Image: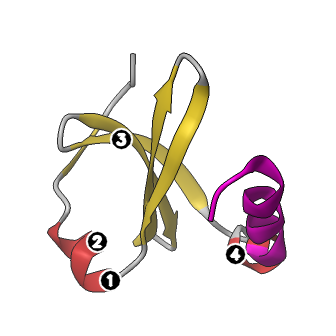
Amino acid sequence: MSGRVPVAKFIVSFASHFWMGMAIDWVETNGQAAVLISRDRVPIALSTIDASAEGIDQIMWIMRPSKLAAISVTKGPIQ
C-alpha cells in the first residue's frame, strides 16, 4: 500500500478500536528510533518510520507476538 490517501484510510479504519487503552513509548531498537505500543504492559506493536528529506517513505509495523518477544529495546529519550 502506498500514497497518503490509501495509507490514511487504512489507519483510520482500525484506529477507533486499536488505540483505545494503549500506552505509547519512544524506544530504540536495533539502533533505530521506534514506537512501542502496549496495552496493560503487554507489547502489541512496534513501529518505525523510514523517512528522507522528501518525506515518509515507509511505516513499518511489527505486530506478531513471537517477533515482539524477540525485540531488544532500550527505553530512553530519542534525540
Say which quadrant the N terminus sits in: bottom right
Which label was assigned to residue 6? none
Residue beneath label 3, please? 27
SS label for mark 1: helix
Lower sequence index among marks 4 and 3: 4
The answer to whether 19 is drawn above or below residue 27 in the figure is below
Say if the magenta span includes residue 45: no
Lower sequence index among marks 1 and 4: 4
Q: Amino acid at mark 2?
A: Leu
Residue beneath label 2, please? 68
The residues bearing labels 1 and 4 have C-alpha atoms spaced at a distance of: 16 Å
Q: Position of residue 27 (x, y in %)?
A: 35, 41
User: What range of the chain is rendered magenta?
Assistant: 1-14
Lower sequence index among marks 3 and 2: 3
Q: Residue at x 54, y 16 (%)?
A: 53
The answer to whether 74 is drawn above or below residue 66 in the figure is above
SS label for mark 2: helix
The answer to whether 20 is drawn above or below residue 23 in the figure is below
Say which quadrant the C terminus sits in: top left
Q: Position of residue 66 (x, y in %)?
A: 23, 83
Q: Amino acid at mark 1?
A: Pro
Residue beneath label 1, please? 65
Q: Position of residue 70 (x, y in %)?
A: 15, 70
Residue beneath label 4, please? 18
Q: Main secondary structure of the magenta part?
A: helix
